[in-house]
Amino acid sequence: MSAMGGFSDLQRSILRLIKQTGPRTLHEMAERLGVTVEAVRQQTLRLEREGWVQRQVQRRPTPKGGRPSYRYSLTPAGEELFPKDYDDLAVEIIDRVAGLFGPEGLHRVLTDMVETRVRWWEPRLRGMSLEERLAALTAIYQDGDPYMRLERDERGYYLVEQNCPFLNVALRRPVLCSVTVSTLTRLLGARVIREERFQRGDGRCVFRVAPDRPVDPTAFRWAPETDASESGAD
């Protein structure tokens, strides 16, 4: 399992045992794995410090003394070490929406996604200049994606995204990217053109913001990316 490449053999065994059988005490894990309790304790405590497992009190100490007993379970980060099928599920949902409700139904969903993001972020940008909004938006994106940065040249401003958080889905259903383009258009009040994109093998997405092509945010809601980038946002 490639996600566990950085773990020791015993750490991998501990994680797999917890995943397969549920929360376990140190003694239970040692017995199942055929190693000493101390060996399991050392590796489990390290996994706990690194955020992969968490302890739960199984038995609290009594007034007469005794130590509490703990069982160890996977944290959400630990769960992510094991195979997940989020990408296929997301693609299936997109396809089912389009299949059941037609293109218009999918467009309504994408429009609502844009509206939600605008409601979240617009109050934080209100009253700012374009340059200030760009800097603030970059900071907002960097909260969840440290690989976003802002650049500028004589043609305008550029939001450069080196890491797409939903790349596997976007590669298969590029229409999803229209949410980002339309959201930026709404929040910045200017035409946004995605000049580089992962789908073309560029290894990143580059969104150029053209200050000389203003857009009325109250009149523009969402558009397919080709329309939003080239004509519909004018």
Image: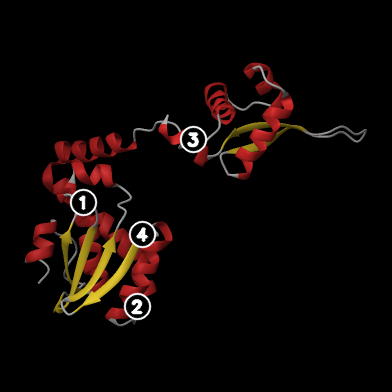
**Label 4 CA crowd tier, 10 Å (few <14, some 14–19, many 20+):** some
Question: Which residue: 30% across, 47% down?
Answer: 166
Residue 77 location, x and y as percent? 50, 41
Residue extending farthest left: 231
According to the image, label 2 marks what residue? 126
Tag nearer the camera, 2 or 4: 4
The reply to whether the C-beta atoms of the residues labelled 4 and 3 are less than 8 Å apart is no
The reply to whether the C-beta atoms of the residues labelled 1 and 4 are less than 8 Å apart is no
Residue 222 location, x and y as percent? 18, 60
Q: CA distance from mark 4 to mark 3?
A: 24 Å
Question: Which residue: 52% across, 37% down?
Answer: 78
Q: Mark 3: which secondary structure? A: helix
The reply to whether the C-beta atoms of the residues labelled 2 and 3 are less than 8 Å apart is no
First along the sequence among labels 1 and 4 = 4
Q: CA distance from mark 2 to mark 3?
A: 39 Å
First along the sequence among labels 2 and 1 = 2
Callout 1 amino acid: Phe
